[in-house]
Amino acid sequence: MAIDYEKLVAWKFAERTHSYSWRDTVLYALGLGLGSDPVDPAELRFVYEQGLQALPTMPVVLGYPGFWISEPDTGIDFRKVVNGEVSLTIHTPLPPEGTLIARNSVDEIIDKGEGRGALLRVRRDLIDQATGLLQSTQVTTMFCRADGGFGGPKSGRPELDVVIPGRLPDMSASRSTLPQAALIYRLSADLNPLHADPVVAEAAGFPRPILHGFATFGIAGYALLAALRDADAESLRELSCRFSAPVFPGETLRTDIWIEPTATLFRCTAVERDKVVLDRGRAVFR
């Protein structure tokens, strides 16, 4: 079954109300490996209820609409879908606990052609129920590898056009991921067995379960905060990147940082394999 462009672009998502507690906020941070040094005061801000801050990347696990791309009416071969890019804009800081209203929508579909796949962009707006303010907007680009050639638009908004400078980075920050990182992180978000079951991972072509891409995104976000803003959760305004390769739990992630006049650019590498896992990264701080 091929993608029906008109049906998919008008896909109706039920509005979701998502309440989260301080325990959820701590669990998210633990899934990213914070608290590995239990006496680090910067990390304790995110894993200890006294003076708790929510990580600014936490909206990516709030208001999730479920695994809707697996529904037959989408026409998508969900088994061959991978996350390509993510862009997060933070309008107001995320409270450490609260209730959010999530509005998900299909933002754009681009047909790259037969055998070349399709790009599906999904938008999520989170509104703080207590204040009525827009808390964050995220746009995730999914690469539907098997779904090109359905007759949809051939072009749309450009993909991330960030160019990483050719010079050496201005600074670098390395963090080791926990061997059990994916098992913890999946409790906050994506329960896909690819991140937990060795048999499923092997069937997908991986030697063992992989870490969630959005977990890598969160780790990079914290690395930038810690390196540039003394781990101030309220300082981050925008964060975006391209997912370029999976991470295996237990690997060391090095975030290379370039400070440019209008934004901070970054790239993440799995040190043990010298493999770039996040590319074209861009951050803007308040």
Image (cartoon, rainbow, N blue to C red):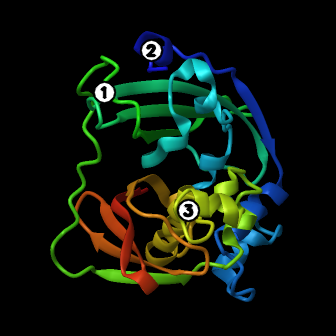
The quadrant holding residue 260 is bottom left
Q: Name the spot of residue 155 as percent of width and height, x first.
A: 23, 27
Name the residue beneath numbered marker 3.
218
Name the residue beneath numbered marker 2.
4
Q: Name the spot of residue 223 as percent of width and height, x first.
A: 50, 73
Marks 3, 2: nearer the viewer: 2
The reply to whether callout 3 and callout 1 are in contact (CB within 8 Å) is no
Q: Residue at x 46, y 52 (%)?
A: 237
| SS label for mark 3 | helix
Q: Residues within 10 Å of mark 3 (few under 14, many from 20)?
A: many
Q: Looking at the picture, tell me which residue is in the foreground, 247 or 199.
A: 199
Q: Residue at x 77, y 56 (%)?
A: 187
Amino acid at the residue labelled 3: Gly
Q: Earlier in the sequence, mark 3 or mark 1?
A: 1
Q: Which mark is residue 111?
A: 1
Q: How many marks?
A: 3
Q: Earlier in the sequence, mark 3 or mark 2?
A: 2
Note whether residue 53 is visible.
Answer: no
Note whether residue 184 is visible.
Answer: yes
Q: Looking at the picture, tell me which residue is in the foreground, 258 or 160.
A: 160
Is residue 59 found left or right of 283 in the rendered image?
Answer: right
Identify the image quadrant of the C terminus: bottom left
From what the image shows, is residue 25 above or below residue 228? above
Marks 3 and 2 sit apart, C-alpha to C-alpha, by: 34 Å
Marks 1 and 2 sit apart, C-alpha to C-alpha, by: 11 Å
Q: Looking at the picture, tell me which residue is in the foreground, 215 or 285.
A: 215
